[in-house]
Image (tube, rainbow, N blue to C red):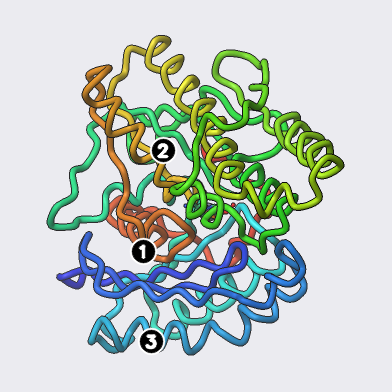
């Protein structure tokens, strides 16, 4: 075994091409190429995503190695996202990682993207604190909304999940109704900062105590906007900040309510959040308050490790490397993969 251990992580599950080099658990580089091409379509176009990954992957990996100031021969292993995600996108990273691992004669480490969002909490940063086991993780992204009990690095149990849309979709689809470009989540967050969260009330869904549902909320928002526009065609532009603040408030209320249920059910008070939506300023604020009000200890990832990134793939690969959990070169990408697989 080479010491120190350098792992290259490659992420290509959706619309971001990313590569990262970590040394032991410290991030040396984390390069993310966003694909602007999807914005005008209001969502990710799978065919365009896989082509963009193919264009980006070589320069992104080269950049990650350059920023880390190492050459590829120093790498101890190659980690890549096996799934879940868009098949065409996953295939680009999978094939690239396999070729590189074979070329360098180093272990190949297949990573579950959903586990990686959670395990990003184990990246060693100067001011970061690592959750102890067991902890509860609220994984909120564009494709998933889950409450997971994490008993060890690779021992996870889904306590609840969405029965329809993911929370990121709720943000993005609401933004689309308001005429905002994709991905709309960060824009709702931005406008919400200037608005009144109690300006408009939206009905919260009624589902099992740890499950989520967001499709009804989206329809409720659509009908509300259509009704208001009949009265005032400029309703959106005149009330954008208040509408965004009210939508964000409703969504975060739903998330907080479910977390409280999870704490009640499990007795676990170490609470982490992960996934793209954990970049949201309101959920971050509310969790900070929960530390004071409910005695929880909360773990909020650094902003750059919330949305899709390869550092989270590299840290997960590193943990697998330490366990000798290497993959065969016949490993295949999987569009559907549970966090427990
Ligand atoms: O984890 P991620 O990068 O990709 C998936 O694996 O899905 O999550 C992307 C999602 C998008 O829906 C995006 O709108 C949302 O995260 N998002 C946000 C914020 N930043 C990203 N949603 C609300 N507020 C934000 N600040
Ligand atoms: Zn993700």
Residue at disc 3, secondary structure: helix
Cα gap from disc 2 to disc 1, whole angstroms: 23 Å
Residue drawn at 50 percent across, 46 percent down: 192
Residue at the far front in the pictured view: 232
Residue drawn at 56 percent across, 84 percent down: 56
Give whichever of 232, 139 is nearer the camera: 232
| Residue 155 placement: quadrant | top left
- Give percent across and percent down for residue 237: 67, 55
Residue drawn at 22 percent across, 32 percent down: 132
Give whichever of 275, 103 is nearer the camera: 275
In the picture, the quarter occupied by the N terminus is bottom left
Cα gap from disc 3 to disc 2, whole angstroms: 33 Å
For residue 25, above or below residue 201: below
Mark closer to the chain start, 3 or 2:
3
Give whichever of 279, 336 is nearer the camera: 279
Would you say the residues marked 2 and 1 are in contact, meaning their CB atoms lie under 8 Å apart?
Answer: no
Residue at disc 1, secondary structure: helix
Residue drawn at 66 percent across, 17 percent down: 207
Left or right: where does residue 27 sit relative to residue 333? left
Can you identify the residue that label 2 sits on? 283
In the picture, the quarter occupied by the C terminus is top right
Q: Look at the numbered disc 2 and say if its residue's Cβ is closer than 8 Å to ligand 1.
A: yes
Can you identify the residue that label 3 sits on? 63
Using a 10 Å C-alpha cutoff, classify the residue at mark 2 as few (fewer than 14 neighbours), some (14 to 19) or many (20 or more): many
Give whichever of 231, 309 is nearer the camera: 231
Mark closer to the chain start, 2 or 1:
2
Left or right: where does residue 290 sit relative to residue 206? left
Residue 311: mark in rendering = 1
Residue 231: mark in rendering = none
Q: Which numbered disc, 3 or 2, marks the residue closer to the eye?
A: 2
Would you say the residues marked 1 and 3 are in contact, meaning their CB atoms lie under 8 Å apart?
Answer: no
């Amino acid at each position: 075994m080479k010491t120190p251990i350098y792992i290259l992580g490659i992420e290509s599950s959706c619309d971001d091409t990313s590569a990262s080099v970590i040394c032991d658990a410290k991030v040396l580089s984390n390069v993310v190429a966003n694909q602007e091409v999807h914005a005008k379509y209001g969502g990710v176009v799978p065919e365009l995503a896989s082509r963009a990954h193919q264009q980006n992957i070589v320069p992104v990996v080269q950049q990650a190695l350059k920023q880390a100031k190492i050459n590829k021969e120093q790498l101890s292993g190659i980690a890549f996202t096996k799934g879940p995600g868009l098949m065409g996108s996953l295939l680009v990273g999978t094939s690239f990682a396999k070729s590189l691992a074979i070329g360098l004669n180093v272990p190949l480490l297949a990573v579950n993207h959903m586990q990686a969002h959670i395990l990003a909490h184990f990246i060693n940063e100067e001011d970061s604190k690592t959750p102890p086991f067991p902890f509860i993780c609220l994984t909120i992204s564009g494709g998933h909304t889950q409450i997971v009990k994490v008993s060890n690095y690779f021992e996870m149990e889904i306590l609840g999940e969405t029965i329809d849309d993911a929370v990121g979709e709720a943000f993005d689809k609401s933004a689309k109704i308001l005429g905002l470009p994709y991905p709309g989540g960060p824009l709702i967050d931005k406008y919400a900062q200037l608005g009144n969260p109690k300006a408009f009330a939206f009905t919260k869904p009624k589902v099992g105590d740890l499950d989520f549902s967001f499709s009804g909320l989206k329809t409720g928002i659509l009908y509300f906007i259509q009704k208001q526009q009949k009265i005032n065609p400029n309703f959106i532009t005149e009330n954008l900040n208040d509408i965004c603040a009210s939508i964000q408030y409703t969504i975060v209320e739903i998330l907080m309510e479910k977390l409280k249920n999870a704490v009640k059910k499990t007795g676990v008070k170490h609470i982490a959040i992960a996934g793209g939506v954990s970049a949201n300023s309101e959920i971050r604020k509310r969790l900070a308050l929960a530390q004071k009000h409910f005695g929880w200890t909360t773990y909020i990832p650094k902003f750059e490790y919330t949305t899709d990134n390869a550092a989270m793939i590299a840290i997960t690969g590193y943990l697998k490397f330490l366990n000798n959990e290497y993959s065969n070169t016949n490993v295949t990408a999987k569009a559907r993969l549970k966090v427990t697989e």
